[in-house]
Image: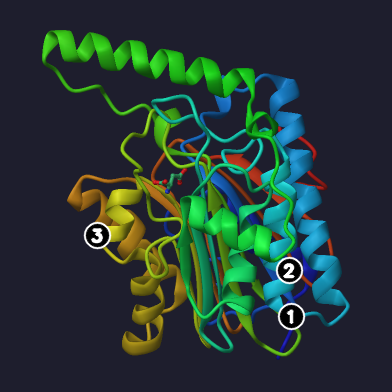
Amino acid sequence: MRTIPLSARTLLLSLVLAAPAASSAHPSGEAAPSGPVLAIHGGAGVVRGNLSPEEEASARAALAQALRAGHALLREGRPALDAVVAAVTVLEDDPAFNAGRGAVFTHEGHNELDASLMDGATRAAGAVAGVRRIRNPIQLARRVMEDSPHVMLVGEGAEAFAQSQGVALVDPAWFRTEKRWQQLQKARAEGAAAERAATVVADDPLRYFGTVGAVALDTRGALAAATSTGGMTDKRWGRVGDAPVIGAGTWADARCAVSGTGWGEFYIRSAAAHQICSRVGLLGEDIGRAATAVIDEEIPAMGGNGGAIALDAAGNIAMPFNTEGMYRGWIGADGVPHVAIGRDDAVAEDGAPAR
Ligand code: ASP
């Protein structure tokens, strides 16, 4: 595989990170970087202007840390699956994101977590949904994939399986943050007011977004994808979104890997992650076109919104989103993390703020 000079590579990355709606890091015709690649997201729907400088710095640092953690494994020659689990684990443990610690609350005041992952080399997949006491749902999803005959386990059954595997359950208080609790109070108050007025609550990005995800290409050329979320603030009745649904929020095969973030019902109804990869595999579209067709065309046409990260087997990345911002980042052969948040964010290395 040919490599492109670092300056050109950085320019291309600037394009994808700064104007991600329609571009890929290495548009067709360009050579992708040699070596392993890892891309991550920390959720669409973030409004950069609403973040305090401290919150922004901390989120950027966490994204850079997640990129380094996954990339270190890829550099050792470990599988893409290891890298996506490592990167997502860092983000699950960071309260800035709606996954693991810092997850949003259900209507009844619980944190109910969903996660899934897929190995593109084998099409093996694992998922958990609605778990309340699993510190790192992505690691349990991997156990489901490797140590059970099933693909998806939910709720108390998933937690019983975790215990049978020696995974310690945590006190649900581990996941609680005051910021998410206040978001629930606001959502509940708005919901009650809307009920009284018989109107529908306007879409608040904070209700729907903040999921984390990763896609990776390893030194053998294998791909993997992983996604983890607390779902939607104020969700009820055991609602499960797209994140743990293989083919909706997560997909990986031999040619393509995708992790989505957005209004999950629409990702399920469009089989978003699978469809992006099918467009690459069956229609021969490049990853940028395929991701744009689903995220920026089909989903908005249905009334949904959000973003995704997508990676092909040549190392081309696409990061489309149609919300105000999406926490996102990329790391390639040079081992330098690139992180962005807003729509017009410039590339920042090492997680340093760009403004
Ligand atoms: N897709 C997730 C869900 O609907 C939410 C998100 O991306 O933040 O549960």
How far apart are the alpha carbons under marks 1 and 2? 7 Å
- Tell whether label 2 touches label 1 (CB within 8 Å): yes
Q: Residues within 10 Å of mark 1 (few under 14, many from 20)?
A: many
Identified at 86% across, 67% down, the residue is: 72
- Tell whether label 3 touches label 2 (CB within 8 Å): no
| SS for callout 1 | loop
Q: Is mark 2 within 8 Å of ligand 1?
A: no
Amino acid type at circle 3 is: Arg
Sequence order check, earlier mark of 2 and 3: 2
Q: Position of residue 249 (x, y in %)?
A: 43, 60
Residue topped by disc 2:
83
Is the residue 61 above or below the residue 136 in the image? Answer: above
Identified at 66% across, 37% down, the residue is: 101
Q: Position of residue 121 (x, y in %)?
A: 59, 88
Q: Quadrant of residue 59?
A: top right
Sequence order check, earlier mark of 3 and 1: 1
Q: Is residue 260 visible?
A: yes
Residue topped by disc 3:
269
Q: Quadrant of residue 248?
A: bottom left
Amino acid type at circle 2 is: Ala
